[in-house]
Image (cartoon, coloured by chain):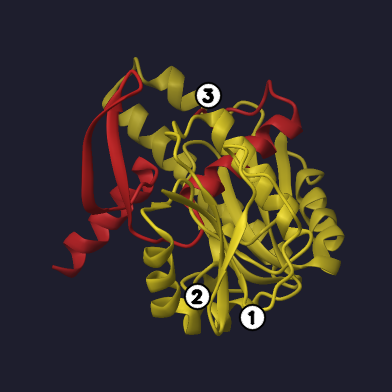
Amino acid sequence: MSDAMESWPDEQVALIDLIDRVIGGGVLITGDVVLGVAGVDLVYLGLRLVLAPAHEVDQSVALLRRSA
Amino acid sequence: MMLLYAVVPADATVPETRGLVGHRLETIRGALAAVIVEECSDRLRATNDESGAFAKIICDLATRTLMLPIRFPTLLTTTSVVLAELQANQAAWRERLSELDGLSEVVIRAQWAQPDRDLGLASDSSGTTYLVNRASAIHRREASVAEITDLVRSCAREIKVLHSQRGVRIACLVGNADVPKLRDAVLSWRQAGGHRQVVVGGPWPPFSFVDQEAVGA
């Protein structure tokens, strides 16, 4: 997702920020996931899994390394 | 599968709403809080379109009830698993819901008309030039964060600097009545010159403030 905003209307920039918050903010609850390809379920993972934007994962990893 | 939308007060009245996959949203209630869910047998692709549709549903719900939005996409297998999560967390959720009553999130995105242009041009030049320009860009970014934070401090209850590849993004937790005041403060920063561009997004549910990790204003 690009951060450039000079050529986009304000509403579009705000929508991008809203979507960023929807997937990067909010209450974190560990969940489950079904992985599949082309609509066919391949494997069900009963893992404790959290989806997050890569930049937030990077920050969490950095924090963990600092505290180790 | 249950797609989770938001945590709301236990006695919240949730309007009849269709969810992302077209099913009616249900409310699973505990003693202190409740969770809004949608039964979801279809796969979620979590595309930008689906994320945007989810955001619209959340924002519509937030106009009717106090809430802590849940990160998209969160799927739990059954109602009983949702209940278990609810029972484990509802005391903390209830407390945070009380703190957030009457507050919304506003995101300020600020950058310059030609952001880091010198940095781009310098990428073909010497390492020293590149580093000097990079340091300048970082300094400008930090100065902007400090300036904007000072401007909105009087009306923001909490402030959180968000990741941004260009310019700065700052999330503010603001009383609903103070949103226009915050917009005016940000506008004054833009009008101070220097080819500044600013977009203020929101008010939205407090996505960035569901816990108490943010730096107090």
Q: Residues within 10 Å of mark 3 (few under 14, many from 20)?
A: few
Choose top left, top right, bottom left or bottom right for residue B97: bottom right
What separation in Å lies between label 1 and label 2 (alpha carbons)? 10 Å
Q: Residues within 10 Å of mark 2 (few under 14, many from 20)?
A: few
Q: Could you tell which of marks 1 and 2 lies nearer the N-terminus?
A: 1
- Residue under mark 3: which chain is it in? B
What separation in Å lies between label 2 and label 3 (alpha carbons)? 37 Å
Q: Could you tell which of marks 2 and 3 lies nearer the N-terminus?
A: 3
Residue kind at label 2, given as amino acid type: Gln
Q: Which of the two residues, B215 or B79, is positioned nearer the viewer here?
A: B79
Q: Is residue B16 above or below residue B12?
A: above
Q: What's the mark number on residue B99?
A: 1
Could you tell me which secondary element the residue under label 1 belongs to? helix
Pointers 1 and 2 in contact (C-beta within 8 Å): yes
Q: Residues within 10 Å of mark 1 (few under 14, many from 20)?
A: few
Tell me the shade of chain A: red
Q: Which residue is mark 3?
A: B117
Q: Quadrant of the C terminus of chain B?
A: bottom right
Q: Is residue B79 above or below residue A14?
A: below
Residue kind at label 1, given as amino acid type: Glu
Tell me the shade of chain B: yellow
In the displayed structure image, the side of residue B42 where residue B15 appears, left or right = right
Residue kind at label 3, given as amino acid type: Arg
